[in-house]
């Protein structure tokens, strides 16, 4: 539907208010129409874009002037409507593509909710942010570090028991012999060397177990931070003007009087 603009100029004369008499009938004020608007009366004031137009047709811009006793309508401009396929205002097939899909909602994650979900279980924040490709990384890191901590703790328990059995001087407790082949004679072993070896291995596995636990705690905190940052920067606008410019330059060294030639890198964002 085409809307017709109007310029309305009102110039009423200032008069003192007069109280009308009772039981009197007022006659309607005449409406004076300019002679040039006679041809515009036969033209439609609304033209539908999807309906055929009965020619002749035009869009008329009128100017309305009011006085005390008349309303004057004067045509200002007239735009004729031509029935020609070359003058199509738009392609109807492009309307559906240009209109936004009201049924599709834009997902905007909440950073606070992402943090709480990731703190509840590592990986839930990444699922909430719809970053599904990060889930195998988080789960794989926890599984690897958890397996490493469990294996090193088992080895630590074995070497700790063997070390204590060696130091208690009880012949019935010799679990340290489980690290040697069955044909090994206990009396042929150097107890000083065995004591240092067991202690060194015990400390080694304890260190690796502690590092795996620290890594699990760090991965837990990293997943929370990643979920918060990812949710906060979901609608971050990245400028398309990112560019890098490389040009040769002369570098001056304070230790040497001779300048050197290098490359100058400049990033624009």
Image (spheres, rainbow, N blue to C red):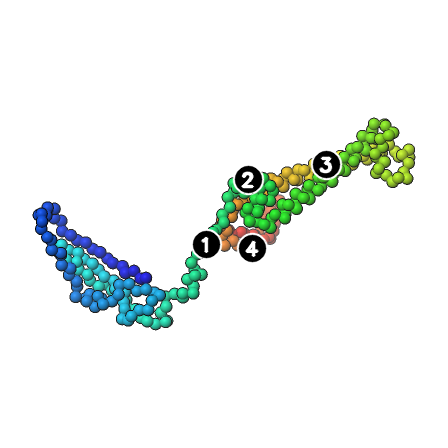
Task: Answer yes or no: is residue 236 visible.
Answer: no
Disc on res. 103: 1
Instruction: Answer left or right for 86 relative to 261.
Output: left
Q: Are marks 2 and 3 in contact (CB under 8 Å)?
A: no
User: Would you name the residue on which mark 2 appears?
Assistant: 116
Please tell me which residue is depicted at 43% across the width and 60% down the height of the picture. Answer: 98
Q: Nearer the viewer, mark 2 or mark 4?
A: 2
Q: CA distance from mark 4 to mark 3?
A: 47 Å
Label 2 vs 3, first from the N-terminus: 2
Residue at numbered disc 3: 207
User: Mark 4 — residue?
Assistant: 246
Q: Is residue 43 above or below residue 188?
A: below
Q: Mark 4 near mark 1, Cβ–Cβ under 8 Å?
A: no
- Towards the viewer: 99 or 217: 99
Q: Nearer the viewer, mark 3 or mark 1?
A: 1
Determine the CA span between mark 3 and mark 1: 56 Å
**Dividing the image into 4 quarters, which one contains the N terminus?**
bottom left
Mark 4 or mark 3, earlier in chain: 3
Q: Secondary structure at mark 1?
A: loop
The reply to whether residue 122 is in sight is yes
Marked residue nearer the N-terminal end (4 or 1): 1
What's the mark number on residue 117?
Answer: none
Q: CA distance from mark 2 to mark 1?
A: 29 Å
In-front residue for pair 46/249: 46
Cα–Cα span, label 4 and label 1: 47 Å
Closer to the eye: label 4 or 1: 1
Callout 3 crowding tier (Cα within 10 Å): few <14, some 14–19, many ≥20: some
């Amino acid at each position: 539907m085409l809307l017709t603009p109007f310029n309305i100029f009102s110039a009423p004369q200032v008069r003192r208010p007069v109280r009308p008499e009772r039981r009197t009938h007022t006659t309607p004020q005449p409406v004076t129409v300019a002679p040039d608007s006679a041809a515009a009366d036969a033209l439609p004031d609304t033209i539908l874009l999807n309906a055929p137009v009965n020619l002749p047709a035009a869009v008329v811009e009128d100017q309305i002037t009011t006085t005390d006793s008349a309303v004057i309508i004067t045509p200002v401009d007239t735009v004729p409507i031509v029935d020609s396929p070359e003058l199509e205002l738009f392609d109807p097939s492009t309307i559906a593509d240009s209109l936004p899909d009201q049924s599709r909602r834009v997902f905007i994650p909440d950073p606070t909710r992402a943090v709480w979900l990731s703190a509840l279980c590592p990986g839930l924040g990444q699922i909430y942010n719809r970053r599904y490709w990060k889930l195998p990384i988080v789960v794989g890191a926890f599984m690897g570090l958890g397996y490493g901590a469990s294996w090193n703790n088992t080895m630590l328990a074995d070497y700790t028991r063997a070390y204590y059995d060696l130091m208690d001087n009880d012949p019935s407790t010799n679990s340290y012999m489980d690290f040697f082949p069955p044909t090994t004679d206990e009396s042929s072993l150097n107890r000083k060397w065995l004591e240092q070896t067991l202690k060194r291995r015990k400390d080694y596995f304890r260190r690796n177990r502690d590092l795996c636990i620290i890594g699990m705690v760090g991965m837990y905190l990293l997943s929370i931070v990643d979920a918060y940052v990812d949710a906060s920067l979901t609608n971050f606008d990245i400028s398309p003007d990112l560019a890098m410019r490389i040009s040769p330059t002369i570098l001056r060294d304070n230790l040497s009087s001779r300048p050197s030639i290098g490359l100058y890198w400049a990033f624009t964002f």
